[in-house]
Image (cartoon, helix red, strand yellow):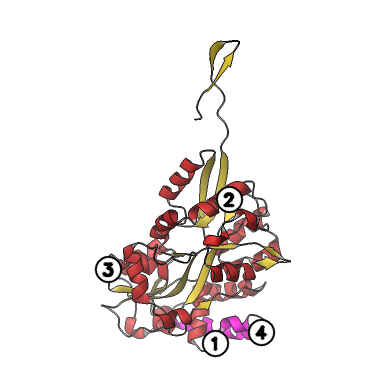
Amino acid sequence: MKPMIRGLLAGTVISMAAAPLSAETLRLLTWGSYAPDEVIEKFEAEYPDIDVEVTFSNNEEMIAKLRATGGTGFDLAQPSHDRVNAAQQEYNIYKPLDMSKIDTDVMTPNLLEGVAANTTIDGEVYSVPHQWGTSGIMVNQAEASGVTGWGDLCNEEYQGRTSMRLRRTILLGMGFAMGYDPFALYDDKEAYQEMLNEVTQKLIDCKSVIKTYWTGGDDLSALMLSGEVVVSETWDSTAFKIYAENPDIVFVPPETGALAWIDTFTIPRGGEADDAAYKWINFVMRPEIVKLMSASTGAIAAVPNGIELLPDDKRAAVEVAFDQSDLDNLKFFANIPPGLEDMEGMALEQIKAASGN
């Protein structure tokens, strides 16, 4: 409720109960943990004329929601850097950014440049980086030793104690494990389909080893902490978050290279609160807010001292997981050409429908 408006009329103090001023709503479409309550409260305290409304989602759902509405219904979205270009060219769901309204000086230059290169269309930039991390393998080292990569998810030594998520990441990871470079095949759909066929059969054969397919970070954390699962595909941030609870559980960058992602700030075409969106972008990149955000996400902010701004336990987990050679071997997701996700979707449906051996 806004304060009552008081006016002086004809020398007489008259108290008037004014109608509440309407607060602008900033509708975020983002990942779980990317809008923690404490950050929202601080933002709304600084900008009392803006209310933050959050819808948690993932890459596939973000595209589907915005495609269904023609880019309306949300004011700021956070797709990964490789999911913007094709979605925009196919569905026209985003609008170019006004870079003059973003404090890009605080962002890590190579991440800023990389995201801009991936999301520039007809000379217009559509995204800037927020947080980054990798996908690889999480291992309970007290229960499993010698794990080096994606292929260990199908190792019969860990029968009934491995897990993965049935999303495109596992197709790419297993492709690398089988000697392919999936990103190099993006422009050759026939060759990419041949790779998918082999990977699909591998993952169908692997079903007898898999304990279960996880769907979210909380789901996976529970499986690992309970000991039901000892080796899993994972986001590194999930492993970093539970390291403090069990330091035997660590992130292992696959020997073929961890798959690296950058989550972005991208404004939907039908967004109605652009100024509020730019305020949110600049606000959450401040060092004191980065600390709160990274404590919630477990991911690294796209600022030069992002690792230093992690909480102590998560910073320790990063240092255990990565050495310089692992960082040099990162495989950043490449822009997905139109039509490729449909091919991958069919492969994932085949795996899902197949019976385990």
Nearest to viewer (mark 4 / mark 2): 2
Whether the residues at callouts 4 and 2 have beta carbons within 8 Å, the answer is no
- How far is disc 2 from disc 3 in space, using C-alphas? 38 Å
- What is the three-letter code of the residue carrying label 4? Glu
Q: Where are the magenta residues, as a range?
A: 182-206
Whether the residues at callouts 2 and 3 have beta carbons within 8 Å, the answer is no
- The majority secondary structure of the magenta stretch comes to helix
- How far is disc 1 from disc 2 in space, using C-alphas? 40 Å
Q: Which residue is mark 3?
A: 246
Which type of secondary structure does the marked residue at label 2 adopt?
Answer: helix
Say which label, 1 or 3, has the lower sequence index: 1
Nearest to viewer (mark 1 / mark 2): 2
Q: Which residue is mark 2?
A: 277
**What is the quadrant of residue 93 in the picture?**
bottom right
Say which label, 2 or 3, has the lower sequence index: 3
**What is the quadrant of residue 319 in the picture?**
bottom left
Percent x, y for residue 125? 66, 63
Which type of secondary structure does the marked residue at label 4 adopt?
Answer: helix
Say which label, 4 or 2, has the lower sequence index: 4
User: Position of 333 compared to 90: left or right?
Assistant: left
- What is the three-letter code of the residue carrying label 1? Tyr
- At 58% from the left and 62% from the top, the residue drawn is 128
Q: Which residue is mark 1?
A: 180
Q: Does residue 292 sit above or below 244 in this rendering? A: above
Which type of secondary structure does the marked residue at label 1 adopt?
Answer: loop
Nearest to viewer (mark 2 / mark 3): 2
Outermost residue to the bottom: 179
Q: Which residue is mark 4?
A: 190
Mark 3 is surrounded, within 10 Å at the Cα level, by few (under 14), some (14 to 19) or many (20 or more) other residues, namely few
Mark 4 is surrounded, within 10 Å at the Cα level, by few (under 14), some (14 to 19) or many (20 or more) other residues, namely few
